Image: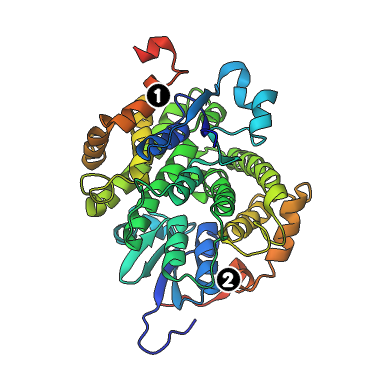
Amino acid sequence: MAKPVLYSYWRSSCSWRVRIALNLKEIPYDIKAVSLIKGGGEQHCNEYREVNPMEQVPSLVIDGHTLIESLSIMNYLEETRPQRPLMPQDCYKRAKVREICEIISSAIQPLQNLIVLIYVGEEKKKEWAQHWIMRGFRAIEKLLSSCAGKYCVGDEITLADCCLVPQVFNARRFHVDLRPFPIILRIDRELENLPAFRAAHPSAQPDCPPEVAK
Amino acid sequence: MAALAGETRAILYGFWLSSCSWRVRATLAYKQIPFEEKSIDIVKQRTQMTDEYRKLNPSQKVPALIIDDTTLVESMAILQYLEETRRTPSLLPNTPLLRARMREICETIVSGIQPLQNIGLKPHFSIEEQYSVFTKYWTRRGLQTLEDLLQKTSGSYCVGDQLSMADLCLVPQLYNAVTRHQLKLEEYTTVSKLYETLLKEKCLSDTHPEKIRLKKVTE
């Protein structure tokens, strides 16, 4: 069977989540870089449209299908490749993982997404992004105070951790003061040096600009 | 819905205008899970901003569901918890690929449209007109993506011929598009056809905002 192919942008937090999950589950894959910036966004070009008519990144070509939406992709991986599970067995803990994933993927990321920030405008975008990140992180910090162990939910790495690390990176990009979020910071520090996370980091991606990779 | 003797009713904190609340309400109704609803006025009274509500839901949003002696937040987390703990009738398609297609539709709605037309965005625009332009723009973009997805996946429902979480996410979002944002759905032929038929689906019609709005608040 052909190796899965992940269409990814080095700095896209949604692409990053999927890279982490693939690495953690030890699923070999190829990366094809799609710039969201060059020429108005390579995701709109004919070549990419043939792979993914939805023109979205990330997309994962796996098992003969093209999948989109990072949370959907990660859940598909969980269901079809159950080795190294990224979801707890207990229903309540699974709900906690999903709560954290959903806060990040629907309450934070879409509001500080590249295209939304372009729309909001240069003058307002930093304040706008900071507001939504801080709001979401306040909620996550509170959730973590009751469900975190070594990682977001208990002591095993889950999909919540896959979502958290890229969001913390984005928070730093927008100069969010992270001192009010000690649990988030602790977990991020715990995870950032693990091989699966390091390999998924933007600076390790084939399309990372050389000046940044240094 | 009345509880059987000895069974505790779940408590849904929601609001009649909230699409996220409607997703959960429809799921509870479909799975025939007894519940009562407490209204959190997120528009006029902004009850979600009180300290009391923040203790229940640190995100200060609706919905929140108290069930099985636990409090759950985030509608998609709630829907999946209900599915895992009360499996029949099911709201999941029966193959991993179809479930992925369902989740693509759900995520397009819950992260691609809903957050960018949320009532909570209004205070961030100095002129209401700007809020209106913003929310319409992102809703239209999302509707086109949905149209493209649904053309491939839908039968009599969003995914084939079985009701799923995708339908329970779709209808509330379209209700917002049509009422709050005054968008016309005709140009999205698959979307508008599904909307018309799904509004008649019992779990959605029984929990329709106009019915909830008129209901007495229970304490």
Residue furthest out toward the top:
A211
* Res A202 label: 1
Q: Where is residue B197 in the image (x, y as percent from the top left)?
A: 73, 65
Residue drawn 32% across the image and 47% down it:
A140
Residue A175 in view here: no
Query: Does A111 appear above or below B12?
Result: above
Label 1: few (<14), some or many (≥20) within 10 Å?
A: many
Q: Where is residue A84 in the image (x, y as percent from the top left)?
A: 34, 45
Tell me, yes or no, whether the two marked residues, 2 and 1, touch with CB atoms within 8 Å.
no
Say which quadrant the N terminus of chain A sits in: top right
Residue A189 vs residue A139: left or right?
Answer: left
Quadrant of res A118: top right
Q: Where is residue A86 in the image (x, y as percent from the top left)?
A: 36, 47
- The foreground one among B205 and A19 is A19
Structural distance between the alpha carbons of marks 2 and 1: 45 Å
Q: Mark 1 lies on which chain?
A: A
Q: Quick one: SS at disc 1?
A: helix
Residue drawn 23% across the image and 33% down it:
A189
Residue drawn 49% across the image and 27% down it:
A30
Quadrant of res B93: bottom right
Say which amino acid is labelled 1.
Pro
Point out the frontmost of discs 2 and 1. 1
Residue A108 in view here: yes
Residue A10 vs residue A118: left or right?
Answer: left
Q: Which chain carries label 2?
A: B
Question: Which residue, given by chain and number where applicable, does mark 2 sit on?
Answer: B207
